[in-house]
Amino acid sequence: MNRVAQVLAAVERLRSLDHPARAFAVTEGLLSRPMVDHVFACTLDRYTPHVVDALASSRFAGGVVGVGLARSVATAPLRAVALPWLAGAEAVRVRASRHQQGLVRAFVAAFDDPRISVTTDLAGVDHAIVYGRDETVRAWASTLPPAVGFEGFGHGFGVACLDAPTEAAAGALALDVARYDQRGCLSPQCVFVRGEARGFARALHEALGALEATLPRGALDAGEGAAVMQWQGVQMAQCGWFRRGAAHAVGSRDEPARVGSPGARNVVVVGVSGLDAVGELLGDERAHVSVLATDRGERALWPWCRGRIVDVGAMQDPPLDGPEDARGPTRR
C-alpha cells in the first residue's frame, strides 16, 4: 500500500465512533464527547484523496523523522504524523506529551505500520519536528546533535479583527471560540472590532450560550479552573460590560487594550477606531499570531501578520496544505 492510501486508510479508521482516539480525546484532551465528534468530523473531512496526494513528496526519503508533540488539541497528532510520512520518511518516531500518551498512541496505531511508532526520546533521528512552547522548541534545538535537521513550531494564538461587526459574525466567531474549548494555537485569544464593542460582545455572549446546548465545554483541570476564575475576576472589574454564561464569559472594552485569555471560552471584545491600530496594540506579540480572522481578508491590510488570514468561523479548520501553523518553522 502506498503512503497516500495508508493515510486515507488511517482516516477511515479514525472515522469510527468507537475508535479509541475519541475516548482519549475526552479523557486526555478534556473535550466533551459532542465536541470530539464535531472536531474529528471537521478534521477528517479535509483528508480527501486529491488533497492528500498533493502532499506526497520525497523530502525525507531514506531518513528517520522524530516528531515531538506538546499537549495540544485532540486532533493534532494526525497531521503531525501524516506530513512526514507522506514526505517519504523511512520511519516516523513520535514523542508524546506526558499528558496525552494514550491519545497519541491511538493516532499512531490508526496508521497500522510498524515504521510509525511512539518513542520516549528523539535519539537517532535524522530530522526532528518539534511542537510546543517557545522554551521547549529552544531546548530541543540546543540539545539535538548539529547534524540533525530541525524544525520547531512554538507559541501561537489567534485574533479576530472585524471592520463591520454583525450578529452573523458573532455566531461564526462563537464557533471559533468554542472549538477545542479555545485551547489551540489557532484559537482566538482576543477580538477587535471597529467602533463600539458592547453590542458585538453581547451577541457573542448569546451565541456562545446557544452553542453550549450542542457543543458543551469539556472538563477543566485544576490549573485551568483557577486561571479562568482569576481572569474572570479581573475582567469583571475592568470591563465596561461583562457577562458569564454556564461555561463561558465575554467582556467588552472601548478603550484600546491588548487583553489575553485563559482559554476555556473566555474572551474580551475591544473596540478600536480603525483596524490599522490592531498591529500596534499587539506590539511584540504580533510575531505569535498564527491566524487572523476577519471580514476584510485582503492580505495587504495586515502587513504585520505572518499567519493565516481567514474568514470568521474558519480559524480552527485550516486547509490541509502543510503544517497548521503557516508562519513557518524555526530552524537552526
Image: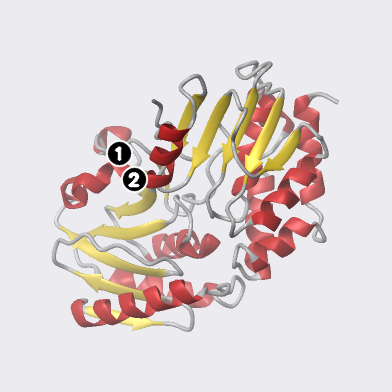
What type is the residue that disc 2 sits on? Answer: Val
Whether residue 326 appears in this view of the structure is: no
**Is residue 36 found left or right of 317 in the rendered image?**
right
Camera-nearest residue between 289 and 131: 131
**Is residue 323 found left or right of 35 in the rendered image?**
left
Tell me whether the residue at label 2 lies in contact with that at label 1, contact meaning CB atoms closer than 8 angstroms: yes
Report the quarter where the N terminus lies: top right
Q: Secondary structure at mark 2?
A: strand
Report the quarter where the C terminus lies: top left
Please tell me which residue is depicted at 29% across the width and 56% down the height of the picture: 164
Mark 2: give few (<14), some (14-19) or many (20+) Cα within 10 Å.
many
Spatial CA distance of label 2 from label 1 is: 7 Å
Circle 2 residue: 289
Q: Secondary structure at mark 1?
A: loop
Camera-nearest residue between 132 and 213: 132
Q: Position of residue 278 (x, y in %)?
A: 21, 50
Q: Is residue 6 above or below residue 232?
A: above
Please tell me which residue is depicted at 26% across the width and 48% down the height of the picture: 285
Circle 1 residue: 305
Q: Position of residue 56 (x, y in %)?
A: 67, 22
**Is residue 184 found left or right of 15 in the rendered image?**
left
In the picture as drawn, the residue positioned furthest to the right comes out as 1
Query: Disc count in the image?
Result: 2
What type is the residue that disc 1 sits on? Answer: Cys
